[in-house]
Image (tube, coloured by chain):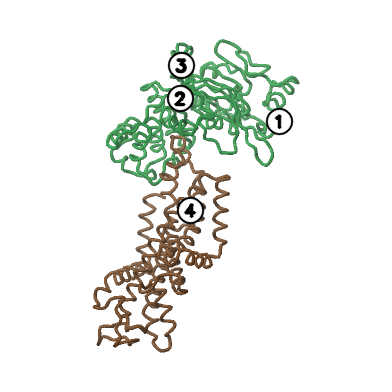
Amino acid sequence: MSATLWRGAAERLRANSAAVAAIWLLAILVLLALAAPALNPNSVETLDWSRVAYAPGMAHAHWFGTDRLGRDLFVRTFEGARTSMAVGLVAGAVSLSLGLGFGAIAGYVGGRTDYLMMRIIEILSGLPLVFFVIFLTVVIGRNSYVLYASVVAVGWLTMARIVRGQTLSIRRREFIEAAVAGGAGPVRVIWKHVVPNVLGPVAVYATLMVPQIILFESFLSFLGLGTQEPHASLGTLIAEGAGEMEAAPWILLAPGIFLALLLVSLNVLGDGLRDAFDVRETA
Amino acid sequence: MSAAPTVAATERAPPILRVDALKVRYALDGAEIAAVREVSLDVAVGECLGIVGESGSGKSQMVLAALGLLASNARTLGSARFEGKELLGLPLAALNRIRGSKLSMVFQDPMTSLTPHLRIGVQLAEVLVHHAGATWSHAQRAALDMLERVRVPDARRRLRQYPHELSGGMRQRVMIGMSLMCEPKLVIADEPTSALDATVQAQILALLREVRAQSGLSIVLISHDLGAVASLAERIVVMYAGRVVESAPTMELLRAPRHPYTSLLIECAPSLHRPRLDRMPSLLGLPPSPRDAEIGCAFAPRCPRVTDRCRVQRPPLRRIDEVAEVACHHPLAP
């Protein structure tokens, strides 16, 4: 995977108008999540008892309305989005590093080590994860580390498989052999020669993994296993909103629309990247 | 063609590389494949040894085994000593201190032997940083010097380029430069010119000759191309079916080959100086499969001088005069 490949991929990505639109949308969403709460005088926790389940409007400070406890939905939606994005990014990065290390070692070392490592992956992916998360929550209690850990537990498995596959496809290439003949040990070969050369396809998968993670976090939070009150994530907000859907649809709509936009933009970007790298051709 | 006046003088010194009764076997689907049946050879200090043989004769397998570069399902027996130190079974860390610094290798395909994502300069400098603990700035300067030494034009600009921006010949120059970064005692070049155009081949061989004249290092040059080897090596070892069949100084070997296989190999080499023939001479038949058990001389089925004895008794490699060794019951007269 050479520098030209990255440059060429960047050019192809720029030519893809859907992907460019997705990047802009993503930038706007990130900016909103970071900056928007500051625009509004309300805080995530403040209860406004005079305006409970208030409809959205510009006439008062609750631009997106309030929930049934009178908390401002404008602030909560973007705060929730911030949490969801943070989980997506952090858990995504951790899954990526874990999967990259594990997959590259399994693929490069090969033989019995590879066999054993891949069986571990299979056993882990066979575990019923939601049950596992409930179990962890019961044992450790609800905190954000359990949430991150359980999200990572899903993410890294597929990443490890993908990296291993890519590693297998390059491990018999001459430049790897030349590096070994040049006196590079396994650690050095993996770090300097294998990992940089599998990064292209891995980057594509990583962009597609982040929305999966965000969705999974939302799913856990929706079930009440994730983010804890008074903090919000898109999942908890949607869960709350779903309960009041008939009486106060805006409680569901604001976080729902944000989540939908976020997932669509990430997926379109991922698809664009996949086309730009044309993984099938270069792998 | 350089005859070597120094060989006789250095012959008494301990060899830089001594391969002794080296065997390489693969266990594949229950069958045993003998990639190298048994090879012994010495490379003297300052010598250039050529190893010639058909595809599958085990010439590459032999050196890869010595360097510990074989696939994990290979079994290596025997001994390979570099500067008197046994390489086989050496712990990886110790092996890695030797590989790439004192003993380096140049591979066949320069198009794919350089890591694609790093600049030429970085790849060259890294060898020195990794093996000699040099500082980056020093290594960068050394990389530039090396590119100039292997005659890469516009070296300063090339340093900043990626491998794909260079032609095959340039890349092979870079590979040779990389193998020389730590001033090795021995360079093993495995078919270094086979993937290149004829004119570029000649340039690369000239470069190897020049490098050798400058630094006095030993070279093992492996090729199926007798002509390429003869232009550089003082001594040639001919391999057939995983064994050495003849070993002699280049001039002797070309002028008066003793083994019928060597003789046929020389006849088969295309030459511009010979009158045009209707058919290129070629060796009939195929070398024996490395899966088969060895009975008699491996070359017997294709040999014009074959007798019943050859079919049942394998000829050992024996010294037949002060310079040559041959494994044949009926060697050709000099």
Residue displayed at 40% across by 44% down = A192
What residue is disc 1 on? B293
Q: Which mark is residue A163?
A: 4
Asked if the residue at tag 2 contacts the one at tag 3, i.e. Cβ–Cβ closer than 8 Å, the answer is no
- The three-letter amino acid code for the residue at tag 2 is Ile
Specify the farthest residue to the right: B308
| In the displayed structure image, the side of residue B246 where residue B313 appears, left or right | right
Asked if the residue at tag 1 contacts the one at tag 3, i.e. Cβ–Cβ closer than 8 Å, the answer is no
Q: Which mark is residue B219?
A: 2
Q: Looking at the picture, tell me which residue is in the foreground, B220 or A95.
A: A95
Give the chain coloured brown.
Answer: A
Marks 4 and 2 sit apart, C-alpha to C-alpha, by 39 Å
Instruction: Give the chain of mark 3.
Output: B
Q: Position of residue B177 (x, y in %)?
A: 37, 32
Marks 1 and 2 sit apart, C-alpha to C-alpha, by 33 Å
Dot 4 lies on which element?
helix
Residue A210 sits above or below residue B3 on the image: below
Residue B268 sits above or below residue A40 on the image: above
| Disc 3 with disc 4 on a shared chain | no
What residue is disc 3 on? B3
Marks 4 and 1 sit apart, C-alpha to C-alpha, by 42 Å
Residue displayed at 48% across by 36% down = B108
